[in-house]
Amino acid sequence: MIQPHLFSFGHGYSAQALARRLLSQGWAITGTTRSADRAQEFDSAGVTPLVLGQDPISSQLSQATHLLVSAAPGPDGDPMLHHYREALVEAAPHLTWVGYLSTTGVYGDHGGNWVTEDTALTPATKRGIARVEAEAAWQSFARDLGLNLSIFRLAGIYGPGRGPFAKVRSGTARRIIKQGQIFSRIHVEDIAQVLEAAIHRPELSGIYNVCDDLPMPPEDVIGYAAELLGLPLPPQEDFETADMTPMARSFYAESKKVSNEKMKRDLDVKLIYPDYKTGLKALLAQDQ
């Protein structure tokens, strides 16, 4: 039996959570990075590092049975398709599954209403527009080569090292209030289990929203973190007058509730953390 081999392009936070699951099942994993320091971290975790710009990509990619692409689009579009298309074409006959990590930002603003995978894509930010273009490029590439491609539109990601507790403890957390603003989010371990489920069902290739069951205003999440810590609520700040970076302000340009029904139905996924309260409680317990 051939050892399954995941090639993880842009081996970041979510991909590393998936890797921990697959390594325990005997998978080989190659992860790309641009940092020699990160390469050492990958090696220590059991992932074969590949430093882009230094190590040749073709030999490792040609051994892969599965491909996960996490890298964000750049000025030239999707970086893997732009820089490594030829290597991808050569590796395609060996790949049984390709996953692309996108964002729910492709939907744009829907005034707090629900969106599904069939909702029209009307991104409100440059990042969202770039993701729509990258999704289309991967769909075209997969169609041409007959690849099983799944696109995962991730909501706001949190998890170990990415929770609100440090800011609440330090007094730097902010409760920005914008009327009607609502976000969806997802714990990184649930992303990992969704990806694992999709890998084992390549025939169900498609587009999946990846989020929990309870979209909520961001200030409610910060408030609950403070409650768990037994600390005072951070003061409210009106969105219109709050001092925010353009990047931070851009996240408030879109308000929507994201449906995860297709993900749960087709991939038979039962969320570990179905809402932010269960997720934050678990994170706090891990911190202690």
Image (spheres, rainbow, N blue to C red):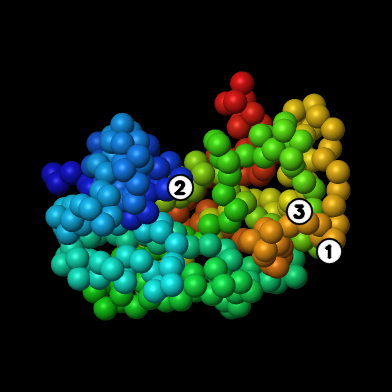
Q: Quadrant of the C terminus?
A: top right
Location of residue 48 (image quadrant): top left
Q: Is residue 262 visible?
A: no
Disc 2 target residue: 14
Q: Cα distance, mark 3 to mark 2?
A: 23 Å
Secondary structure of the residue carrying numbered label 3: loop
Label 1 Cα neighbours within 10 Å, binned few <14 / some 14-19 / many ≥20: few
Q: Is residue 145 visible?
A: yes
Of the image marks 1 and 2, the number of the one nearer the N terminus = 2
Q: In the drawing, does residue 201 fall left or right of residue 92?
A: right
Residue at 62%, 44% in the rendered image:
274
Report whether 20 appears left or right of 285: left
Identify the residue position indicated by label 3 in the image.
217
Residue 243, image x, y percentages: 78, 56
Counting residues from the start of the chain, the first of labels 3 and 2 encountered is 2
Disc 1 vs disc 2: Cβ atoms closer than 8 Å?
no
Nearest the eye: 85 or 96: 85
**Residue ID for mark 1:** 240
Figure check: 108 above or below 152: below
Element assignment for label 1: loop
Residue at 54% of width from left, 36% of height from top?
A: 160
Q: Quadrant of residue 127?
A: bottom right
Instruction: Specify few, some or many for label 2: CA neighbours under 10 Å numbering under 14, 14-19, or 20 or more.
Output: many
Q: Residue furthest top?
A: 288
The residue at 34%/78% (across/down) is 140
Amino acid type of the residue that numbered disc 2 sits on in the rendered structure: Ser
Q: Residues within 10 Å of mark 3 (few under 14, many from 20)?
A: some
